[in-house]
Image (cartoon, rainbow, N blue to C red):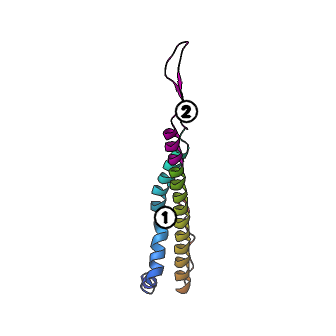
Amino acid sequence: MEDIIKNMDPQTIQAMIEAGLYNERMTPLKQKFGIGQGMMDAPMAQGRNVQSGPFGTYVASSPFEHIGNMVQKVLGSYLAGNAMQGENDAATARGKGRLAYMKALMSAGQPPAAPDDSGQ
């Protein structure tokens, strides 16, 4: 195996390393996605009753509250979308790394072992 690695170009070795870092890359992306989802699911601004009794007063929500909610939802959508793109990039890098590993083993005349997908 050591001879196989010595004969590899640096891009192939880097691709194999990237494939091994898949789980470490996914953890912060999943957290970022969760934060984005939470921001998008926040309730909208609502008016409120400020006085109880028969002569209660209803105060409508401020336009600034609506703007703040809109900005929060847009930001949440951006974070979730960015996290999903990162997940796609990590999966692509993992696939490239596995392919590089398989090609390296095949060029050395060794049969490739099946990848362990237990941790993805």
**Residue 112, located in which quarter of the rendered image?**
bottom right
- Report how far apart the C-alphas of labels 2 and 1 lie in the structure: 43 Å
Q: Mark 2 highlights which residue?
A: 46
Residue at 55% in and 38% down = 44
Residue at 45% in and 61% down = 24
Q: What is the x, y in percent for residue 89?
A: 53, 67
- Give the label, 2 or 1, closer to the camera: 2
Tell me which numbered mark, 2 or 1, is placed earlier along the sequence. 1
Residue at 53% in and 47% down = 73
Q: What is the x, y in percent for residue 40?
A: 55, 46
Q: Which mark is residue 62?
A: none
Tell me the quadrant of the picture where the N terminus can be found: bottom left
Residue at 46% in and 62% down = 25
| Residue 68 drawn above or below residue 57 | below
Circle 1 crowding by C-alpha within 10 Å: few under 14, some 14–19, many from 20: some
Circle 2 crowding by C-alpha within 10 Å: few under 14, some 14–19, many from 20: few
Q: Which residues are magenta?
A: 44-73
Tell me the quadrant of the picture where the C terminus can be found: bottom right
Q: What is the x, y in percent for residue 54?
A: 56, 12
Looking at the picture, which amino acid does disc 1 mark?
Tyr
Q: Secondary structure at mark 1?
A: helix
Q: Which mark is residue 22?
A: 1
- In reply to whether residue 43 is colored magenta, the answer given is no
| Residue 34 drawn above or below residue 87 | above
Pick the front one: 108 or 65: 65
Q: Secondary structure at mark 2?
A: loop
| Residue 86 drawn above or below residue 100 | above
